[in-house]
Amino acid sequence: MNKYLKNLNRIEFVVTMACSGRCRHCSQGEHKCNDKIDKDLSSDAVRKIAQIYNIQSVMTFGGEPLLCPETVFAIHKTAKEMNIPERQLITNGYFSKDSDRIKLIAEKLSECGVNDILLSVDAFHQETIPLTYVKAFGENVKNTGVRIRVHPAWLVSHSDNNEYNIRTRELLREFSEMGIVASEGNVIFPSGNALEHLSEYFDLNKPVENPYSEDPSDIKAICFSANGDILGSNIYRQDIGEILSSYYPEGR
Ligand code: SF4
């Protein structure tokens, strides 16, 4: 076991950079590339990593991960086989307008072992994502019994009364009436589109710590990019086992 990864307990996948939304707060920018991670390489990575490290959670997100549902299914099915307890999906809920397909995907997520779905709903997502299909997906997931929560992005803070947060609270009420509660959500970090389109809401003179940054000498979570990049290497050119064992934090 690599000593710099001894506390590794979480694996995340950006399944694809393609997205059905065009959010003005998106930390990933304009989504000009459509990279998607290979289904077999990614599920194989889950198996190999979980054989060595005490992985407690696997999370899939994007872009919009349900534009590549087979990859999401394969990753979580493997996570379930490896007894990884938390199997999480973050989705904007908009991947199809076909009610049969929406129902089918919801049922397959349940079958493959996803047990926590975070649905991105807020003033920003709903500027470009039609609520009808998101609600249909939410309703279908609820019927499967899989835990689902709305996961909003807040501007400035959870309690700030800017126009976006007011609209977000209205949307959360609609989901609450459907029986879908909200998670704490997250506060928008000034990067990507948010920095470009919402800069007046940030004090750019104040240093802001990226909430997703990791101590490179004690990594607890690793995140695969949609192009296969991971820990300074790439799963298309090097086996994940070798990548983990040869990892060395830069600057040490
Ligand atoms: S915030 Fe999420 S849904 Fe919106 S563009 Fe970015 S990845 Fe897509």
Image (spheres, rainbow, N blue to C red):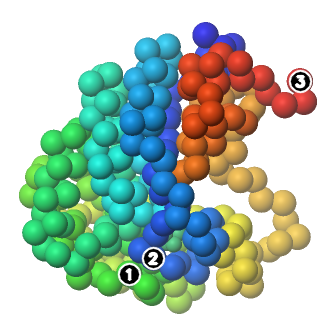
Tell me which numbered mark, 2 or 3, is placed earlier along the sequence: 2
Is disc 2 in contact with disc 1, using a CB cutoff of under 8 Å? yes
Residue at 71%, 53% in the rendered image: 210
Tell me which numbered mark, 2 or 1, is placed earlier along the sequence: 2
Residue at 65%, 51% in the rendered image: 211
* Mark 1 residue type: Ile
Q: Quadrant of the C terminus?
A: top right
Give the left or right position of residue 108, taking residue 227 as reference: left
Q: Is residue 221 above or below residue 125?
A: above
The verdict on label 2 being within 8 Å of ligand 1 is: yes
Task: Tell me the element at label 3.
Answer: loop
Task: Tell me the element at label 2.
Answer: loop
**Of all residues shown, which one is farthest toward the top?**
1
Label 3 CA crowd tier, 10 Å (few <14, some 14–19, many 20+): few
Q: Which residue is under mark 3?
A: 252
Residue 54 position within the rendered picture, expressed as x and y whole percent measured from the top left: 47, 18
Q: Quadrant of the N terminus?
A: top right
Q: Is residue 181 above or below residue 46?
A: below
